[in-house]
C-alpha cells in the first residue's frame, strides 16, 4: 500500500458550480465522454470510445445484444458450407445508405474487401484485428441480396467477428479521399454524423429506426469531476468513467445515480518487445521472460483496486475473461521480496545507488478509470523493487492512440483492451499473428502461434480447451503483459432517462428512452 499512500491524490470531491442550463429536449440524449473520436473511416476506427459512436452510424451483419448473444441485423438468412470455409448471407431488401445509395450485397462484399487492401495502410480494428482473426480470404456478391464470405480456416468466432465490420456503401466511399472518409462518414445505420466539433462534441441525427431519440450528443469532457458536475446539474444524461470518489455525490444528488458493472476490459501494462524498444532504457531487460515474471510480484493489484478504483477485484491470470480462463492458474500475489529475489536470480541485482535498471512507463490521462493515478502507482511499485521507472502521461486521442497504432510505445505502457464473455478465443485473438495490429507488444513466441492454429481448427471451444489452457499457462509465465485487473465500469445515469450499461463497454442507445416513457 505504501506506493499508493505516497501518491498525491485528491481525497475530496471538488465540483465547481455550473451555471444552470436547460435540460436536454425530450427528443435528445446527451452523453459526457472522456475522450474524442479519432476517425470515422470505418476501417480506421480502433478504440472502444470511437466505436461506441460509430456503431450508431454504421450497420453490421450481426450484433451482440445486451445478454451477449449474437443476433442477425442486416442478415435475413445464413448458410454455412460443410467444410466451414464459406458463409453465404441473404441480406434484407430495401436497404439504403445516408445519401440514398441502395445498400446491396456488393456493398457488403466491399466492406470486407476494402480493409484487405494493403496499399491503403488501414490500422483500425477491422484490418488489424477482426479480419486476420476471422481468416478472411475474400468476399463476393452473388447477386443484389446474396454475399459469400470465404475463410482460410473454419472458426467458432465467425459470426461474432462479422458483427464488428461496419458495412458501408461502395460508390460513396470510392468517391472520397482518405481524409474525407475520416471526417465525413456516410451512414448505413440509424444515425448520421451531423456535426463534429473536435475536442468538444459530436452530434448524431436519426435517419431511420431503431432509435428512440432524434438526436444524440456526445460531449467530450476529459475531466471526471466536470463530467460529474454536468450530470448533477442536469446538462447531460449519461457519463462514463465515474471516478470512485464521486460516486457518493452522484448517488446523493437526487438527479442521478451510478450504475456499476463488472467489465470485460482487460487492464495491463504491456511489455514492448519490439526491436525498436530494445535500444530504449529497460528495453533489453524486459526481453527476458524471467524479468517479466518477476515484475508481476512487484505490483499490489488488489491494493490499487481498493484504494484507487474504490472496489474489490481479483488479479487477472491471463487475457481471457472469466469464466473462460484457465481455472488452474492462480493470481500472482503482491510480494515485493519475491520480486527482488527473482530479479537477482535473473541477473539484475541492485547497484550501489539501489537501482537495477531504468525504464519508462507511458500511460493515457483520462481514457480509463483513474488511469493517471494507477499508472503513477505502478511506476512507484516498480521503483520500490529497484526498477527505476519514469512515468509519462499522455493525451489519448491525438498522442497516445497514434503511438499504439504505430507500435512506438515506451518499453512499458498502460493499456486496456476490450473483451467478451462468449468465446475465449476472441479475447486471445489479440495475438492472432506476430504482426497483428492489436499485438502492440510485438510478442512472437512460436509456441503460442502454433497452438493458436490448433485452437482455431477445433470444431468447438470445448474441443479446443486443452490447447487453450496450455496457451494461457504460457501467457501467465512468459507473456507480454504485466497482469492487472478487469476494469470495473461506473456510469452516471440521470433519472431523466431509462438506460442500462453493458458489461462489454458497448454503449448502446438504440433502446434508451425517457424515464417518463416506462
Image (tube, helix red, strand yellow):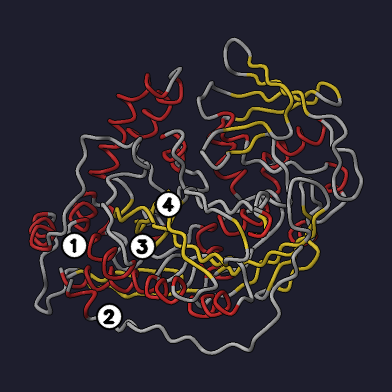
Q: Secondary structure at mark 1?
A: loop
Q: Secondary structure at mark 2?
A: loop
Marks 3 and 1, Cα distance to the nearest angstrom?
Answer: 17 Å
Relative height, residue 331 to residue 233 (above, below): above
Q: Is residue 345 left or right of residue 79?
A: left
Give the labeled residue for mark 4: 263
Q: Are marks 4 and 2 in contact (CB under 8 Å)?
A: no
The residue lying toward the viewer, choosing from 281 and 157, is 157
Could you classify mark 3 by the number of other residues whose Cα lies within 10 Å: few (under 14), some (14-19), or many (20 or more)?
many
Residue shown at 54%/58% (left/top)?
406
| Residue at which label 3 appears | 411
Q: Residue at x 92, y 46 (%)?
A: 100
Residue highlighted by disc 2? 7
The x, y position of residue 179, in whole percent, is 77, 61
Relative to 135, 327 lies left or right: left
Disc 3, SS: loop
Mark 2 or mark 1, which is nearer the start of the sequence? Answer: 2
Mark closest to the chain's N terminus, 4 or 3 = 4
Q: Are marks 1 and 2 in contact (CB under 8 Å)?
A: no
- Pick whichever of labels 4 and 2 is earlier in the sequence: 2
Cα gap from disc 4 to disc 3, whole angstroms: 27 Å
Which sits earlier in the primary sequence, circle 2 or circle 3?
A: 2
Q: Position of residue 127 (x, y in %)?
A: 61, 43
Could you tell which of marks 3 and 1 lies nearer the N-terminus? 1
Of the two numbered discs 3 and 1 in the rendering, the one whose residue sits closer to the viewer: 1
* 72 lies left or right of 179: left
Asked if the residue at tag 3 contacts the one at tag 4, i.e. Cβ–Cβ closer than 8 Å, the answer is no
- State which quadrant residue 177 falls in: bottom right
Tell me: 499 left or right of 141.
left
| Of marks 1 and 4, the one in the foreground | 4
Question: Which dot marks residue 298?
Answer: 1
Q: Does residue 347 lie above or below 9 as drawn?
A: above
Amino acid at each position: 500500500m505504501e506506493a499508493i499512500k505516497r501518491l498525491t491524490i485528491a481525497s475530496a470531491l471538488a465540483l465547481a458550480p455550473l451555471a444552470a442550463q436547460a435540460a436536454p429536449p425530450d427528443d435528445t440524449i446527451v452523453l459526457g465522454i472522456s475522450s474524442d473520436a479519432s476517425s470515422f473511416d470505418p476501417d480506421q476506427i480502433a478504440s472502444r470510445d470511437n466505436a461506441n459512436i460509430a456503431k450508431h452510424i454504421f450497420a453490421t451483419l450481426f450484433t451482440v445484444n445486451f445478454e451477449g448473444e449474437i443476433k442477425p441485423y442486416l442478415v435475413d438468412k445464413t448458410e454455412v458450407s460443410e467444410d466451414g470455409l464459406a458463409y453465404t448471407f441473404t441480406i434484407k431488401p430495401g436497404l439504403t445508405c445516408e445519401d440514398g445509395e441502395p445498400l446491396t450485397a456488393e456493398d457488403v462484399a466491399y466492406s470486407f474487401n476494402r480493409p484487405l487492401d494493403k496499399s491503403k495502410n488501414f490500422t483500425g480494428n477491422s484490418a488489424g484485428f477482426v479480419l486476420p482473426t476471422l481468416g478472411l480470404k475474400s468476399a463476393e456478391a452473388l447477386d443484389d441480396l446474396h454475399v459469400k464470405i470465404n475463410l482460410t480456416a473454419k472458426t467458432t468466432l465467425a459470426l461474432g467477428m462479422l458483427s464488428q465490420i461496419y458495412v458501408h456503401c461502395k460508390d460513396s466511399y470510392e468517391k472520397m479521399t482518405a481524409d474525407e472518409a475520416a471526417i465525413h462518414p456516410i451512414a448505413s445505420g440509424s444515425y448520421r454524423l451531423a456535426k463534429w466539433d473536435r475536442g468538444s462534441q459530436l452530434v448524431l441525427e436519426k435517419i431511420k429506426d431503431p432509435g428512440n431519440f432524434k438526436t444524440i450528443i456526445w460531449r467530450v469532457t476529459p475531466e471526471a469531476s466536470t463530467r460529474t458536475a454536468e450530470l448533477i446539474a442536469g446538462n447531460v444524461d449519461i457519463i462514463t468513467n465515474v471516478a470512485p470518489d464521486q460516486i457518493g455525490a452522484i448517488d446523493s444528488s437526487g438527479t442521478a445515480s451510478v450504475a456499476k458493472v463488472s467489465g470485460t476490459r482487460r487492464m495491463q501494462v504491456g511489455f514492448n518487445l519490439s526491436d525498436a524498444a530494445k535500444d530504449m532504457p529497460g528495453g533489453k531487460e524486459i526481453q527476458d521472460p524471467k524479468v517479466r515474471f518477476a515484475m508481476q510480484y512487484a505490483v499490489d493489484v488488489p491494493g490499487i483496486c481498493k484504494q484507487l478504483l474504490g472496489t474489490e477485484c481479483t488479479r487477472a491470470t491471463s487475457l481471457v475473461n472469466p469464466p473462460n480462463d484457465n481455472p488452474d492458474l492462480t493470481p500472482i500475489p503482491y510480494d515485493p521480496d519475491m520480486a527482488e529475489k527473482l530479479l537477482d536470480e535473473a541477473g539484475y541485482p541492485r547497484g550501489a545507488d539501489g537501482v537495477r535498471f531504468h525504464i519508462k512507463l507511458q500511460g493515457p490521462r483520462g481514457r480509463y478509470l483513474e488511469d493517471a493515478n494507477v499508472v503513477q502507482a505502478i511506476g512507484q511499485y516498480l521503483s520500490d523493487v529497484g526498477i527505476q521507472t519514469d512515468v509519462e502521461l499522455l493525451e489519448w486521442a491525438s498522442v497516445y492512440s497514434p503511438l499504439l497504432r504505430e507500435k512506438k510505445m515506451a518499453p512499458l505502457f498502460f493499456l486496456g483492451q476490450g473483451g467478451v464473455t462468449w468465446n475465449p478465443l476472441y479475447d486471445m485473438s489479440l495475438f492472432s499473428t506476430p504482426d497483428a495490429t492489436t499485438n502492440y507488444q510485438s510478442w512472437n513466441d512460436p509456441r503460442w502461434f502454433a497452438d493458436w492454429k490448433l485452437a482455431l481448427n477445433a470444431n468447438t471451444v470445448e474441443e479446443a480447451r486443452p490447447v487453450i489452457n496450455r496457451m494461457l499457462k504460457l501467457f501467465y509465465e512468459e507473456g507480454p503483459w504485466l497482469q492487472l485487473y478487469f476494469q470495473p465500469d461506473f456510469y452516471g445515469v440521470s433519472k431523466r432517462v431509462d438506460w442500462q450499461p453493458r458489461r462489454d463497454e458497448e454503449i448502446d442507445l438504440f433502446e434508451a428512452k425517457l424515464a417518463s416513457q416506462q
